[in-house]
């Protein structure tokens, strides 16, 4: 088929951020006097942004105000703790270079805070993406499709000429609601079954397989 635009989720799709998410989450929990979490627990909390992650990681009795304060701590600590062990998935830089050379528009739409997306993408993929955005006042959290729809409009790309790639059920729902082609990546943080149940039109096990679409 081929597409005019490829929009990517970030955590679990472009970058393996879990080691840093575990460290940052536990640093925040420690700062607020809450019990620490295991890597498996943090993995089960990811996918809906930092605030949702902290809501799940915090003790059940923690108030919404306390969780919001913890999220503010998260944002303050992210520059120091959010990048240390993060790495692109094998084959991802090569895929992006090839797609760009073919003239495709490339974007990132994440549930990570917009400022954090603005920090991490230039570190690992300088000059690659036409646009990279995260959750903010103007961009609602996925699976709301508004952020993806707006990005495609700015690209001048019809939804049916675009693919959205992600590792979560929410990513697949976002693509479908925006009218884009949903591609599930199996190297991320949610199982194949979750992607299939959420309506993935295609599952890929390695970045190079995307070039065959």
Image (cartoon, rainbow, N blue to C red):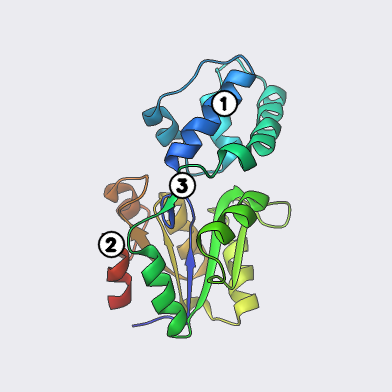
Query: CB under 8 Å between callouts 1 and 3?
Result: no
> Residue at the spot x=68%, y=31% of the render?
73
> For residue 130, which numbered disc appears in the image?
none
> Can you say which quadrant of the picture contains the N terminus?
bottom left
**Mark 1 residue crowding within 10 angstroms, few (<14) / some (14–19) / many (20+):** some
Image coords of residue 203 (percent x, y): 29, 61
Q: Which residue is mark 2?
A: 206
Disc 1/disc 3 C-alpha distance (Å):
17 Å
Quarter holding the C terminus is bottom left
Residue 147 lies in what quarter of the image? bottom right
Tag 3 or tag 2, which sits nearer the N-term?
3
Circle nearer the N terminus (2, 1) = 1
Query: CA–CA distance between discs 2 and 3?
Result: 18 Å
From this view, report whether residue 170 is shown above or below residue 156: above
Q: Residue at x 55, y 66 (%)?
A: 126
Residue pointed to by mark 1: 27
Q: Is residue 127 left or right of residue 75?
A: left
Q: Residue at x 37, y 53 (%)?
A: 198
Residue 24: image quadrant is top right
Viewer-nearest residue: 174 or 22: 22
In the displayed structure, 195 sits above or below 101; it is above
Q: Residues within 10 Å of mark 3 (few under 14, many from 20)?
A: some
Q: Are marks 2 and 1 in contact (CB under 8 Å)?
A: no
Give coordinates of residue 123: x percent, y percent: 55, 57
Query: In the rendered view, would you say 146 is above or below 59?
Result: below
Residue to which mark 3 is pinned: 86
């Amino acid at each position: 088929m081929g597409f005019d635009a490829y929009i990517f989720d970030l955590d679990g799709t472009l970058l393996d951020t879990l080691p840093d998410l575990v460290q940052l989450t536990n640093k925040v929990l420690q700062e607020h006097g809450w019990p620490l979490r295991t890597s498996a627990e943090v993995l089960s909390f990811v996918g809906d942004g930092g605030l949702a992650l902290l809501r799940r990681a915090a003790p059940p009795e923690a108030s919404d105000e306390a969780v919001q304060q913890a999220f503010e701590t998260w944002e303050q600590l992210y520059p120091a703790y959010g990048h240390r062990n993060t790495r692109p998935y094998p084959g991802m830089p090569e895929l992006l270079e090839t797609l760009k050379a073919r003239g495709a528009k490339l974007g990132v739409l994440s549930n990570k805070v917009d400022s954090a997306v603005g920090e991490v993408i230039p570190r690992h993929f300088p000059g690659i993406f036409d646009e990279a955005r995260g959750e903010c006042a103007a961009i609602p959290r996925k699976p709301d499709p508004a952020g993806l729809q707006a990005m495609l409009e700015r690209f001048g790309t019809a939804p049916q000429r675009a693919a959205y790639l992600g590792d979560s059920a929410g990513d697949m729902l976002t693509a479908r609601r925006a009218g884009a082609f949903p591609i599930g990546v199996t190297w991320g943080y949610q199982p194949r079954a979750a992607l299939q149940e959420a309506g993935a039109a295609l599952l890929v096990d390695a970045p190079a397989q995307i070039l065959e679409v």
